[in-house]
Image (cartoon, rainbow, N blue to C red):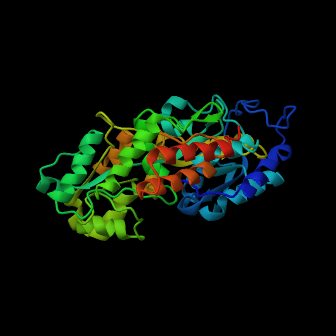
């Protein structure tokens, strides 16, 4: 799950934790990243493991806790559910006070911030094999070449479309940018949709829909400790993104809650880009009749093939101030096993971060879900830098101004860069 923007004051408060977490510091008072990667002791886990988790994950995590204690009878897993809207501040405050739980779910866009403050314990080198995970999710745990957690569940974005409208228009699913534009036009002109495709026209999180186009075009958000948003590749991607609004294929104002699902079921919206949760939302609105009228396919790449998509989700991290470090990491390791990840999918429908968990079992039952497993092979995550939340908010604003014709794409991208440079990476 991805996080909302936090204020500069909260970022400053979180930054104060360096001296409170017991990490080694250099002469400038910064945590010595990567200094601790000691192995976890062998044998079953023992003692109490305090875990924080947000939203539905926190409400259902006792399922994994019970399975873990079956294998580790001398261990106890105590779960504290935390609302997402207050989670960032709660974690930052706990780190600053040196009173953290042992393990927490950490939103992927928070990793850079909390790792840089010294609040997270580096992932033991022999705990898991990074190659077992999809590359994009694993990279979300890495800050300045050191991993500070393990991907737990993931989400990515793919293209939903009305198969009946596509058939009526004589269209096949798009496999390139040119085909995506023609596909949206056909769904609208021959398929009868009012909007050929719904693209997010700004507001919080719109960068997650836009950035895949920039990534597919070769753009990079950072290079080392510097932002590199202002590039010809990003400008070209934003020009393409804007063209869907200029040509009337997507509206330039956000939809009200529930309107996307209802419009898709009604056939007034021919396609949209979103994550796996929309499978259930569409079925909830459309009932059994909608199942034969929609499909999901990977995002088309600029010049063909599967295009890069955004990847988010949640990581499990152990705090530097944990009172039961070894047992905490053993719980994280347990949550990373393919069988455990399949159990978690059956419990809450969170998609596994471990590639082998997709090779059999419950995730093969629904072909629409399997598409997201295919898409996860081509994903990118935002940079794991402490300031990403603030920079993302600026990008959202500039996207909105561009798609509404208030500024040219080149000027919008230049402003993204200017704002990012003024904020800095925090590295």
Q: Quadrant of the C terminus?
A: top right
Is 103 above or below relative to 38?
A: below
Q: Residue at position x 33%, y 43% from top? A: 299
**Along the line of sight, the residue nearer the viewer: 142 or 359:** 142
For the question of whether residue 377 can be seen, the reply is no
Q: Classify residue 185 as left or right of residue 40.
A: left
The image shows residue 14 at horizontal and vertical percentages of 76, 51
Q: Classify residue 46 as left or right of residue 142.
A: right
**Along the line of sight, the residue nearer the viewer: 417 or 42:** 417
The image shows residue 412 at horizontal and vertical percentages of 50, 48
For the question of whether residue 317 can be seen, the reply is yes
The image shows residue 301 at horizontal and vertical percentages of 33, 37
Q: Classify residue 188 as left or right of residue 2.
A: left
Q: How many marks?
A: 0
The image shows residue 345 at horizontal and vertical percentages of 44, 52
**Along the line of sight, the residue nearer the viewer: 222 or 262:** 222
Q: Residue at position x 29%, y 68% from top? A: 263
């Amino acid at each position: 799950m991805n996080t909302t923007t936090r204020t500069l004051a909260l970022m400053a408060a979180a930054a104060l934790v360096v001296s409170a977490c017991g990490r080694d510091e250099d002469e400038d008072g910064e945590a010595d990243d990567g200094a601790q990667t000691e192995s976890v002791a062998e044998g079953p886990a023992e003692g109490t493991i305090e875990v924080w988790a947000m939203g539905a994950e926190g409400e259902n995590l006792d399922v994994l806790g019970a399975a873990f204690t079956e294998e580790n009878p001398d261990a106890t897993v105590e779960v504290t559910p935390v609302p997402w809207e207050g989670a960032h501040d709660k974690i930052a405050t706990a780190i600053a006070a040196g009173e953290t739980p042992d393990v927490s779910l950490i939103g992927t866009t928070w990793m850079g911030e909390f790792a840089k403050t010294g609040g997270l314990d580096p992932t033991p080198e022999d705990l898991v094999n990074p190659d077992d995970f999809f590359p994009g999710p694993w990279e979300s745990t890495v800050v300045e070449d050191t991993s500070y957690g393990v991907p737990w569940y993931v989400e990515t974005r793919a293209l939903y479309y009305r198969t009946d409208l596509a058939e009526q228009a004589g269209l096949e699913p798009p496999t390139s940018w040119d085909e995506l534009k023609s596909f949206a036009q056909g769904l609208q002109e021959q398929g009868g949709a009012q909007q050929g495709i719904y693209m997010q026209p700004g507001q919080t999180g719109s960068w997650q829909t836009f950035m895949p186009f920039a990534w597919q075009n070769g753009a990079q958000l950072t290079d080392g400790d510097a932002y590199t948003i202002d590039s010809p590749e990003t400008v070209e991607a934003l020009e393409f993104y804007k063209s869907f609004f200029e040509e009337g294929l997507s509206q330039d104002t956000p939809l009200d809650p529930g309107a996307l699902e209802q419009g898709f079921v009604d056939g007034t919206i021919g396609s949209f880009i979103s994550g796996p949760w929309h499978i259930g939302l569409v079925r909830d609105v459309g009932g059994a009749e909608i199942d034969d009228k929609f499909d999901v396919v990977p995002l088309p790449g600029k010049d063909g093939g599967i295009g890069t998509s955004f990847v988010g989700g949640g990581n499990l991290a152990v705090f530097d101030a944990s009172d039961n470090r070894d047992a905490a990491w053993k719980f994280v390791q347990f949550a990373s096993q393919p069988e455990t990840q399949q159990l978690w999918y059956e419990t809450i429908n969170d998609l596994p971060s471990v590639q082998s968990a997709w090779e059999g079992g419950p995730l093969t039952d629904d072909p629409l879900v399997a598409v997201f497993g295919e898409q996860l092979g081509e994903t990118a995550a935002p940079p794991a830098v402490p300031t990403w939340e603030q920079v993302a908010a600026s990008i959202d604003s500039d996207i909105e101004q561009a798609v509404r014709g208030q500024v040219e794409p080149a000027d919008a991208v230049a402003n993204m860069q200017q704002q990012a440079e003024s904020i800095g990476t925090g590295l």
